[in-house]
Image (cartoon, grey):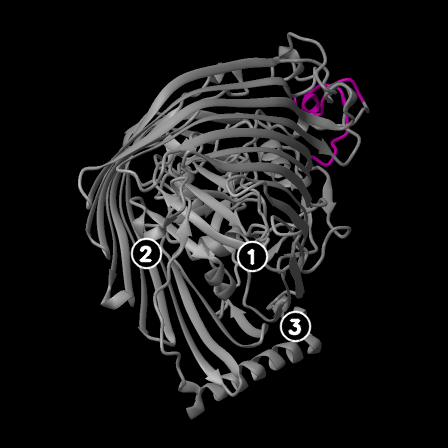
Amino acid sequence: MAKQTKQGQPKRLAWHAILFATTALSGAVAAPSAFAQDEESAVGDIVVTATKREENLQDVPISVQALGAERLEELGITDFEEYAQHLPTLSYSPSYGPGYNRPFMRGVASGENGNHSGSMPSVGTYLDEQPITTIVGNLDMHLYDVSRVEVLAGPQGTLYGASSQSGTVRIITNRPDADAFSAAYDLEFNATRYGGYGQVGEGYVNIPLGDRAAIRIVGWAEHDDGYIDNRLGSRFYETCDFDVGCLGSGPTDENSDVADQNYNTTDTLGGRIALGIDLNDSWTITPQLMGQQQRTDGAFAQQSDVGELAVMHFFPEWNEDSWIQGALTIEGQINNFDLVFSASRLSRDVDSNQDYADYGYFYDVFAGYGCYYVDNAGAGSICDVATGGARLGNPINPGQQVGGNDHYDRETYEFRIASPANSRIRAIAGIFYQLSEHEIHQRYYFSEDFRDDYEVTGWADTIWLTEQTRTDEERALFGELSFDFTDSLTATIGMRAYETENSLVGFFGFGSGFSGSTGESQCFGGPFRGAPCTNLDASTSETGQLYRANLEWNIDEDRMLYATYSEGFRPGGINRRGSFGPYQSDFLDNYEIGWKTDWADGRLRWNGAIFHQVWADFQYAFISTGSSGLTQIQNAGDAEIDGIETDVTWVPFDSLRINAGATWLSTELTSAEITGTQVGSELPVSPDLKFDFTARYEFTLGNWEAFLQGGATYVGERQTSILTLGPDSDAELLGTLPEYWIADISAGIEQNGLSITLFIDNLFDERAINGRYTECAVGTCGAPPLGDALEGTFYDVVSRPMTAGVRFGRKF
């Protein structure tokens, strides 16, 4: 009932106007004159650079799904979640909001929590020639004036290296064009059910600078209104102790200063500028600068014990993500050999503050630690009162906040040379270097005056501090060799020799008052970047090789079969707590048979692959009950993944195009090396079936070109954890994420570069659950240890409710 207050008269009028316009356009579709058609049509071709050569997608003997510029525009795709919806092989694990999504491919996911000192991602993300993958998630780059999004499924270790273990996502931007001036702008206005209004403004201009140079400038601004309420409420923190139970007293907190409606808003501002210079007929140089600022407020999940599209949080929640990347690409030819040099520098800053009150409520209080959180009234803790001692301090509100600042620097260099593509023997060889440095700052603090001798030295009211620097370095030599046995049979072999290093240095833990606990009591070195001392300084390194073999059989000019063996890996690394020891690299072996075919005179395209993958010593990052909320990473065992992926494009007649794709997976643990896992259980995160379908009908409406479009995405059930043993296992407490359907429709008209589009996303207002988590260890925040009367608190990351809007576009 509370949600009904969010729908006022202006919102109803906006919805009525949008629905009326949609109905009017639908009526026009029925007009007899609407069926005029063009004489010619085809499925269409996309040129990709998945193998680091320009090739027609149908000629590339690996599994590649691509959304070209036209499809991106037709589907209204502007961010990661939107293109992931339409690519069945791609799944993701959401977290706190935009910028924290972790992509996965082909079921290669263990459910790791994305901690900044945890495993590298298993999917690499590239912007043109440069990797943009970071530990906590991919850059949530706004997509505009983009040539295509390529998704390379399966290990891409030989050409793309670490973090392309299960696949690679490549975002290819439009390049400066010296041949002609062009420009465009697009405006969008939308309204979200149970939410507010949003706006998007985008534009680009391409300006030739003589015959051999051009500059391309792109910009965007977007406001997404919220749909999650922070409801007014209070929480009683009863002070409890393991030995004597609960004391019947404690502080109460209320959230009137932060309670609000629709409070999970997002504001994005960014741009890109690229200069293309043809030095001569053989050499081109392209410097590019791109940056984005994104501010989010609130939580992007609904709270299980509060209600649909609502939470009850007590502290400010916001995230500011700013990044800039400079890149330089030099391309040329020497004696018909193609040479490419690329260099880039990425700098990213993420400042944040998060509500962490659940930790204080469950872990610190009901697990027996709340009695330590007192003020300066005495010389000890209130726990002593319960055992007959003198009163030593007054309890304070144990609800915590987490203030964070993460600074990333990454520099990447690659040089490669490719022999002529039309030779019978073809080769690509290159050298790669990457250095990433991540400065980590996280402060867990109270809103009230915390006891001085329990604080982290130099940090007022702070119970826990992380001040660390993580460094990841990779060097590699790579190459591939292809040989045409006949005009229709080609074999390719590839190898990558690599060396990786990982180090972690700094401070993490409690203040000196917590003797024997992680923190100041374990220090061995001096101050570190504002922290009182150093208690961690460790590194690890390794070398190895990855291999790939491929056999391609072109049956005729329209049909091709291929078989592939490929390998991928993620580097090992350092656990923050020394007693955990380092974790080792994990490896993925892929066995695949695929096909790429065109039928019916080019009107039907059917591609697909069948694969078997062996994931050895896979890494798993988790928070165990009793670990003080400290993430640890272990090699959890082995798993096998079998799957089928396919995509179809069909143009039955000139004005109708149908796109469909699906991925089916069967995953299984084949060995279990950590407590709580069992052989035979499924891997989490990825559904056993994901299906996407879109139909687009184009026609003439008077002097306008018009279209109707509809589509739906199905995502099957998903496991939430590999920890399945025991009555209160993480998997049982979190449960299974239910299947869902998401449907979208749109209609529009276009004439002489002017376009108007009406759309409704999430047509049936499905409350799709994309992820579920707790704020602390699942066994504590999800299953309180002091009896069954208290329920755990879970958070469901849900899709945006039904959103309707209109887009205006103009091309010059």
Q: Which mark is residue 78?
A: 1
Specify few, some or many for label 1: CA neighbours under 10 Å numbering under 14, 14-19, or 20 or more: some
Q: Is residue 135 above or below residue 67?
A: above
Q: Is residue 582 above or below residue 38?
A: above
Q: Is residue 369 above or below residue 274?
A: above
Q: Which mark is residue 7?
A: 3
Q: Secondary structure at mark 2?
A: strand
Please check the rendered image and state whether residue 306 is part of the magenta-colored stretch, yes or no: no
Q: Position of residue 401 (x, y in %)?
A: 69, 37
Q: CA distance from mark 1 to mark 3?
A: 27 Å
Q: Which mark is residue 562?
A: none
Q: Secondary structure at mark 1?
A: loop
Q: Dividing the image into 4 quarters, which one contains the N terminus?
A: bottom right
Q: Position of residue 422 (x, y in %)?
A: 31, 42
Q: Position of residue 728 (x, y in %)?
A: 41, 38
Q: Horizontal placement of 408 versus 693: left or right?
A: right
Mark 1 or mark 3, whichever is nearer to me: 1
Name the residue carrying label 2.
Answer: 662
Main SS type for the magenta part? loop
Q: Horizontal placement of 33 versus 330: left or right?
A: left
Specify few, some or many for label 3: CA neighbours under 10 Å numbering under 14, 14-19, or 20 or more: few
Q: Horizontal placement of 252 versus 595: left or right?
A: right
Q: Secondary structure at mark 3?
A: loop
Looking at the rendered structure, the kind of residue marked 3 is Gln
Q: Horizontal placement of 391 versus 414: left or right?
A: right
Looking at the rendered structure, the kind of residue marked 2 is Ala
Range shown magenta? 378-398
Residue 125 seen in the current view: yes
| Residue toward you, 650 or 729 | 650
Mark 2 or mark 1, whichever is nearer to me: 1
| Residue toward you, 598 or 137 | 598
